[in-house]
Amino acid sequence: MTRYTGVNHLAMATGDMDATVRFWRDLLGMRLVAGLGHEGYRQYFFEISATDMIAFFEWEGVEPLVEKDHGVPVRGRYAFDHVAVGVADSEALWEIRDRLEGAGIWVSEPVDHGFIHSVYTFDPNGIALEFSCMVPGVDVREHPRMTDSAPCAAALQGPEPVAGVWPEGTPTPAEDRMVYPGEGHDFLHRKRNRWD
């Protein structure tokens, strides 16, 4: 089974990279670790943790989302609700809340979800954000729980991956493995680092 290391990055969109950098780097304190771009295109990556990043494309004409409260049901085509970022502990959760409130940005009171405590807000692009810390002594990764009163059939099979549901993939032979150049293919070697 594949071993995952986290969310490498979530890719969002913005029409205002300056406001996005000011919010994610300067207000939230996430390092801006990579920036790709050329005329009419940018993609910047912010470090959430040692394994997780959030990235933003900037394209002309992108407008902020209409703010929708976190977890409120919707109808029609819809795929994304909110981004939840983990923080170390309750002290860090209050620090984020106080920083947002001090900047004049709406932020909820902390909410107890049983295994996590969370606060909710929106970034300048209208992206719904949650900041969460684990409740000490409650580890759903170590001790999974299903309290849904009417769980779907697949969920009733338990927390572990079920073998045989999908066909096994055929391994690509080493000699056939190709990595094709993308927007950042010359990122490390051919383009000037503008921070040097």
Image (cartoon, rainbow, N blue to C red):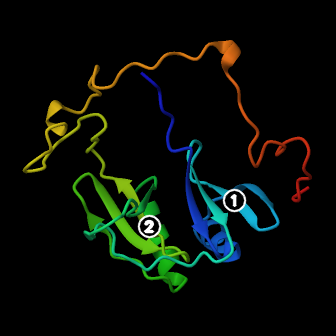
Q: How far is disc 1 from disc 2 in space, using C-alphas?
A: 18 Å
Mark nearest the camera among 1 and 2 is 1
In the rendered image, which quarter contains the C terminus?
bottom right
Give the answer, above or below, for where 109 lies relative to 179: below
How many dots with numbers? 2
Mark 1 residue element: strand
In the rendered image, which quarter contains the N terminus?
top left
Q: Is residue 67 left or right of residue 76?
A: right
Q: Is residue 38 left or right of residue 83?
A: right
Quarter of the view holding residue 121: bottom left
Give the answer, above or below, for where 172 lies relative to 36: above
| Kind of residue indicated by mark 2 | Leu
The location of residue 169, given as percent across then percent down, is: 45, 20
Q: Is residue 54 left or right of residue 83?
A: right
Quarter of the view holding residue 146: top left
Which is more toward the observer, 104 or 57? 57
Q: Which residue is mark 1?
A: 44
| Kind of residue indicated by mark 1 | Tyr
Which is more toward the observer, 110 or 39? 39
Which is more toward the observer, 6 or 50? 6
Q: Which mark is residue 129?
A: 2
Q: Residue at x 16, y 31 (%)?
A: 157
Q: Residue at x 52, y 83 (%)?
A: 102
Which is more toward the observer, 162 or 129? 162
The location of residue 32, given as percent across then percent down, is: 70, 59
Q: Is residue 26 left or right of residue 119?
A: right
Circle 1: is it few (<14), some (14-19), or many (20+) Cα within 10 Å? many
Q: Residue furthest bottom?
A: 104
Give the answer, above or below, for where 153 lies relative to 171: below
Mark 2 residue element: strand
